[in-house]
Image (cartoon, rainbow, N blue to C red):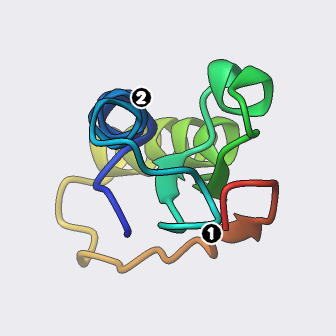
Amino acid sequence: MFVGNDAMAVGAYQALYQAGLQIPQDMALVGYDDIELARYMTPPLTTIHQPKDELGELAIDVLIHRMADPQQKQQRVQLTPELVVRGSA
């Protein structure tokens, strides 16, 4: 199961546990965000790591350039997330 973020994955862990299902034996689970808690869950959560620091730096850089030149063309910036395989999938 893929959930929209790691915080929702915490809820999915609880719901699967209450349903008597084991992760990953009965249901694989993958989150998104790679929050600090993900590595400490049992089993550790497989997740998609979003490069938040790089995203913040790029956002500030784009904003500064946009403020310096409001006529600057819009640009598309793409960052590559990374799958962090742990014990839940």
- Quarter assignment of residue 19: top left
Quadrant where the N terminus sits is: bottom left
Q: Residue at x 41, y 34 (%)?
A: 17
- Amino acid type at mark 2: Val
Residue at the disc numbered 1: 81
State which tag comes first along the sequence, 2 or 1.
2
Decide which of 27, 30 is in the foreground and name it.
Answer: 27
Report crowding for label 2: few under 14, some 14 to 19, many 20 or more residues within 10 A (C-alpha): some
| Residue 26 vertical placement versus 63 (above, below) | below
Residues at discs 2 and 1 in contact (Cβ within 8 Å): no
Residue at the disc numbered 2: 10
- Judged from the image, the secondary structure of the residue bearing numbered disc 1 is loop
| Residue 15 vertical placement versus 83 (above, below) | above
| Residue that protrudes farthest toward the front in the picture | 20
Q: x and y percent of residue 83 in the render?
A: 71, 70
Q: x and y percent of residue 41 in the render?
A: 68, 26
- Amino acid type at mark 1: Pro
Quadrant where the C terminus sits is: bottom right
Q: Residue at x 59, y 40 (%)?
A: 52
Decide which of 57, 48 is in the foreground and name it.
Answer: 48
Residue 33 image label: none
Q: Is residue 20 left or right of residue 22?
A: left
Q: x and y percent of residue 36 in the render?
A: 69, 21
Q: CA distance from mark 2 to mark 1?
A: 21 Å
Q: x and y percent of residue 10 in the render?
A: 41, 28
Q: Residue at x 27, y 69 (%)?
A: 72
Q: Residue at x 51, y 67 (%)?
A: 26
